[in-house]
């Protein structure tokens, strides 16, 4: 019998699970809505107006105008993904360099959550993707916001959870259902992600947002914790800039500001920042 993925009933997130969790984790609020144009844009607007505080969470069952990095469209079948944005706006506020680490902090939190909930191992592709093997399962988009108390950042994640192969837009994408061989509880996954995110946020703020200082309970810094999972390292990559220039070389390490160190074939070392690049791809054409 041919499986019709679009006819399958996908359960809604259990909203009643989150008020107690929010109180336990110190989250300002957790809002789960049926539909959003963009959870990042909606939460950023709430942050700018003062209506959302530190660790406010907005999750949409269906995001209809989602955008990835560089404005690429990201839309999934209703109930098949986890589309969630988190506002980081602590008092006192962190500096821009510390706030720029929250893309990687979210990547680490979600990769740990996935491993806990469905035993799928994820890797990080610099600067903002999560991978199963060589296929993308999650994209992350962070944007700086100005709140009444200072600078903050909204970190949006789009995790492919329950899609079947025919529902994925490209053959370089996958879902947790495909990777694990069965259904994955989105409520459990969201709850575990928020636990991991809140824990890492508290530990990172406790060291003043210094990415090279070991975190309490971890014995390693945020930079090293992320670097252990960074699939980009050791690969020969093509780095493409918006003006059309390119650098090809070996990805060496994650630098203190979250940038990527690349050693070109002529031996020169390049410091590449996420906001400065158009694409970072493996030179052999593979996605990872």
Image (cartoon, grey):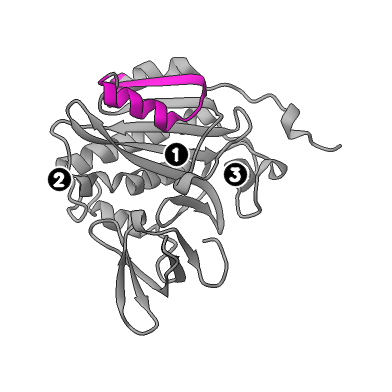
- Residue sitting at the far front: 243
Image side of residue 98 versus residue 37, left or right: left
Q: Which region of the structure is painted magenta? A: 23-50
- Quick check: 265 above or below 84? below
Residue 272 is situated, as x and y percent measured from the top left of the image, at: 33, 64
Q: Disc 1 to disc 2, how far (Cα)?
A: 25 Å
Mark 2 lies on residue = 207
Instruction: Name the side, left or right, on which 151 lies relative to 197.
Output: left
Residue 230 is left or right of residue 181, and the answer is left
Q: Nearer the viewer, mark 1 or mark 2?
A: 1
Q: Single out the residue that lies furthest toward the bottom.
A: 266
Question: Residue 6, position in %: x, y?
Answer: 73, 31
Measured along the vertical axis of the image, is residue 122 above or below residue 280?
above
Q: Earlier in the sequence, mark 3 or mark 2?
A: 3
Specify the quadrant that holds the N terminus: top right
Residue under numbered circle 3: 175
Q: Which mark is residue 157?
A: 1
Identify whether 160 is placed above or below 18.
Answer: below
Residue at (34% x, 49% y) in the render: 104
């Amino acid at each position: 019998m041919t499986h019709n993925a679009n006819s399958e009933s996908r359960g809604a997130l259990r909203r009643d699970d989150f008020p107690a969790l929010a109180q336990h984790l110190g989250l300002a609020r957790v809002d789960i809505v049926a539909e959003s144009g963009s959870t990042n844009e909606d939460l950023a607007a709430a942050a700018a107006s003062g209506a959302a505080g530190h660790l406010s969470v907005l999750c949409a069952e269906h995001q209809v105008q989602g955008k990835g990095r560089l404005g690429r469209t990201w839309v999934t079948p209703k109930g098949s993904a986890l589309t969630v944005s988190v506002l980081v706006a602590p008092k006192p506020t962190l500096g821009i360099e510390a706030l720029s680490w929250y893309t990687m902090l979210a990547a680490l939190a979600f990769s740990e959550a996935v491993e806990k909930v469905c035993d799928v191992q994820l890797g990080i592709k610099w600067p903002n993707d999560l991978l199963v093997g060589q296929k993308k399962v999650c994209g992350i988009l962070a944007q700086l916001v100005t709140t009444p108390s200072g600078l903050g950042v909204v970190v949006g994640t789009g995790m492919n959870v329950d899609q079947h192969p025919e529902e994925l837009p490209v053959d370089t994408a996958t879902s947790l259902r495909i990777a694990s061989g069965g259904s994955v509880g989105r409520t459990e996954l969201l709850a575990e992600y928020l636990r991991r995110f809140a824990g890492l946020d508290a530990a990172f703020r406790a060291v003043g947002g210094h990415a090279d200082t070991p975190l309490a309970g971890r014995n390693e810094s945020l930079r090293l914790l992320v670097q252990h999972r960074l699939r980009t390292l050791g690969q020969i990559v093509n780095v493409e800039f918006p003006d059309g220039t390119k650098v090809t070389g070996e990805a060496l390490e994650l630098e203190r500001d979250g940038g990527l160190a690349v050693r070109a074939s002529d031996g020169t070392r390049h410091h590449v920042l996420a906001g400065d690049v158009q694409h970072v791809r493996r030179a052999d054409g593979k996605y990872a």
